[in-house]
Amino acid sequence: HVERDQEIQIARLKLPIIAEEQVIMETISENTVIILAGSTGSGKTTQVPQFLYEAGYAENGKIIGVTEPRRVAAISMSKRVGREMNLSTDIVSYLIRFEGNCTPETKIKFMTDGVLLKEVESDFLLLKYSVIILDEAHERSAYTDILIGLLSRIIQLRNKKGNPLKLIIMSATLRVEDFTKNLKLFKEPPPVINVESRQFPVTVHFNKVTAEDYAREALIKTIKIHTKLPEGGILVFLTGQQEVKYLVNKLRKLFPFYGNKNAKKEEIKTESEQQLNYSDDEELDQILNIRKAIKHQKKNKKNLISQMTLPKVNLDDFQMPGDDTEADFNEDQDMLDENFEEQDEIDEKLNEMMTGTGNSQPLWVLPLYSLLPSHKQARVFEPPPEGTRLCVVSTNVAETSLTIPDVKYVVDSGRQKTKFYDKVTGVNAFVVTFTSKAAADQRAGRAGRVAPGHCYRLYSSAVYSNQFVQFSPPEIQEKPIDGLVLQMKAMGIEKVINFPFPSPPDRVQLEVAEKRLKILGALDNQEVSKITKLGSSIASFPVNPRYGKMLALSHQQNLLEYTICIVAALSVQEVLQEVPLSGENGEKDTKWRTKRRGWAGNGNSLYLGDPMILLKAIGAAEYAHSQNKLQNFCDENGLRMKGVQEIRKLRVQLTNEVNLNVPNLSLAVNPKMEPPTDQQAKLLRQILMSGLGDQVARKIPDDEIKLKEDKHKFKHAYQIPDVEEPVFMHSCSILKKKQPEWVIYQEIFETRNGDSTKMFIRGIT
Ligand code: ADP
Ligand code: MG
């Protein structure tokens, strides 16, 4: 029996899903698998677990399990459901990697999909669960996809045992054919219930141009909305934590809120002082200029004050994205830019309103991203303090996972951070890309939940039409398949090819991946291969197995610090600026070249080759950073600053992961890391070899060249297995002069000159 507070009960009754409770529960009891589609905010995540609880699915010691692709959703939703049901966190709990509050009494358990996958490893039948809800299945996270495949089999086994397990797949979109039409997955297509919910019209406004600096663009747009448009919450979509913090900081400075509680004020202050990596002063100047410009602009208009507070906006015309009628907003934008420089005298009253302490309405600015502490995440659901306007600056967690109440304006950068797999280097990296059209439309939809709203897209309609894909492809078809195959083998799924993926990865790629894993020694050589002990240890690192192997081996030799550095450096493209042989940059080139030769060392150090340069460069850059001299250091040494920063981030991340994976280890990123000794360099060379051993090239000896017809073609050439054409060392390689007989390389690429092509290898050891 559940006793809810009255206020909660009233809020629940407004949710569209409540009207469907009976249909949903009947369908669940008559079917093993059901698919539940309903737009964001209809109440799926918060209500369905409660329906199940009240229907007795948590009786007899069984648990209701709910998976989320994002940690933030797992935590936040467990809290919300507990609160709605008046049950403690001992009963409604969560578990994410490295953190959780589950107890033996837990009845409803929210977890990340990765956590449930790990549980399958130790309890294949998931016997403690009576029902599993896979939430946000439309996101097509690789883990969710694998879970769907696994659960399609687990439910059969549980049925046979007379101990059935129910599976509920929830999606924010009706695009579920991959689950319903895939006979390998579910022989009988599961029933689909669609929860209709009311959506108010949202007017979509495109920018005329697509600015590169979307964070700044977002700032300007938010300022404009806040100062010119009627009340209503603002939701801004950026790509990552850093950007979110940046914008929050700027907006708080511009429209400060000095509540009556000192505590709040303190909190805001400390948060905004935590900023990293942004040169505040310069930015702030820009902002102040913008403010001046806005003031100026207002002065030029009549009815200043009434404009400030309540301009009329026509909210009834719903535009489909594509038919692009620019909003008045963009005209303002243009005007703003033109008037940027002018500094006429400013209207007294307006000045008062805009200078913070005056009447300018404070903005209640809240950040939202995955790693934000959960009590701070929860604030986005509370009403803003009286007299303020709510503004949430979020990564794409607010796209479908969390519904923020009372949003009327959405500012969409059109970007997201995605984990990107470089097929050449085999390395994972986070890159900022355009979202899909589907995601952009989800974001716009956030503005229309309580009333008609507006979505401001910081990109042009042409970019939307031509460069946005319709849907993001399922992660599983994008991810490095090697790592995935290894993980499945680690779970005892040996015939990966037969696995019922909702959308299977390419068959050939699967086979190639197995072959590569065998070469690495992560799988044994049987026809249907099993994971080896080394493989299990490789699988524990969150990187491509090649690099996982390097990390696993370097632990034995106490070289982890260096290997982490090398793996991080190899994961970022073109960190070293090219030094043209012609010496175009004069002295600078010579200086850079000398520097690199110094970094490469000699003897055993030299033969570590290009990774050694990266290693030393990164070590020195870390030191420069600790002295606040990174930019200078990069300029001096011909390093790409942004690349160096990416490597630093990755290095920290890898260090943390390694610490978590290897017991009794507490590595830190040391700004004073000593360069490796000759002996260590030799070992590092072997470690690189262990991961890149299938990317090997041999210098063609002179006496072999003599026998060839077109001798000139083979001068300084290397040969790689199974390829007739010669390959050459790229001119940026430090080993170009030495030309050792045997090398391994990180990357091979082809350049075209007229009709002829030439292959080069890069990243040579
Ligand atoms: P769905 O899963 O269908 O997208 P949810 O169940 O997440 O919908 O949300 C239903 C409603 O509950 C939304 O209006 C949302 O704003 C509200 N809600 C969710 N979490 C909280 C919370 N922590 N505090 C207040 N309201 C919340
Ligand atoms: Mg949800």
Image (tube, rainbow, N blue to C red):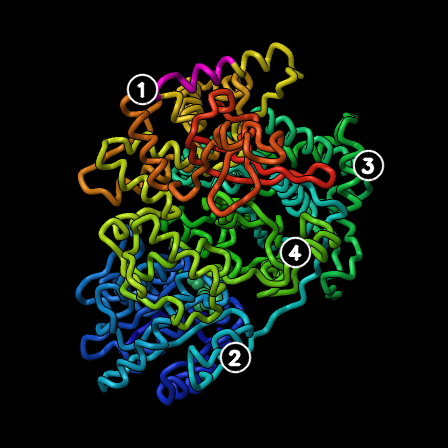
User: Mark 1 against mark 2, which lies toward the viewer?
Assistant: 1
Q: CA distance from mark 1 to mark 3?
A: 62 Å
Residue occupied by mark 3: 300
Label at residue 194: 2
Graded by Cα atoms within 10 Å as few (under 14), some (14 to 19) or many (20 or more), the crowding at tag 1 reads: few
Closer-to-camera residue (657/476): 476
Q: Earlier in the sequence, mark 3 or mark 2?
A: 2
Does mark 3's beta carbon lie closer than 8 Å to ligand 1? no
Quadrant location, ligand no. 2:
bottom left
Q: Earlier in the sequence, mark 1 or mark 4?
A: 4
Q: Residue at x 34, y 59 (%)?
A: 114
Question: Looking at the picture, which amino acid does disc 2 mark?
Answer: Asn
Please determine whether, in this image, residue 298 is positioned above or below residue 151. above
Residue 229 pos. (x, y %): 68, 50
Task: Pick whichever of labels 1 and 3 is earlier in the sequence.
Answer: 3
Query: What's the residue type where badge 4 is placed?
Result: Phe
Q: Amino acid at mark 3?
A: Asn
Range of residues picked out in magenta = 594-604
Q: Is residue 598 magenta?
A: yes
- Tell me: residue 59, above or below residue 346: below
**Mark closer to the chain start, 1 or 2:** 2
Secondary element type, mark 3? loop
Which residue in the structure is indicated by mark 1?
674
> Which mark is first along the chain, 4 or 3?
3
Amino acid type of the residue that numbered disc 1 sits on in the rendered structure: Glu
Query: Disc 3 to disc 4, how far (Cα)?
Result: 39 Å
Q: Which part of the image, by quadrant, shows the N terminus?
A: bottom left
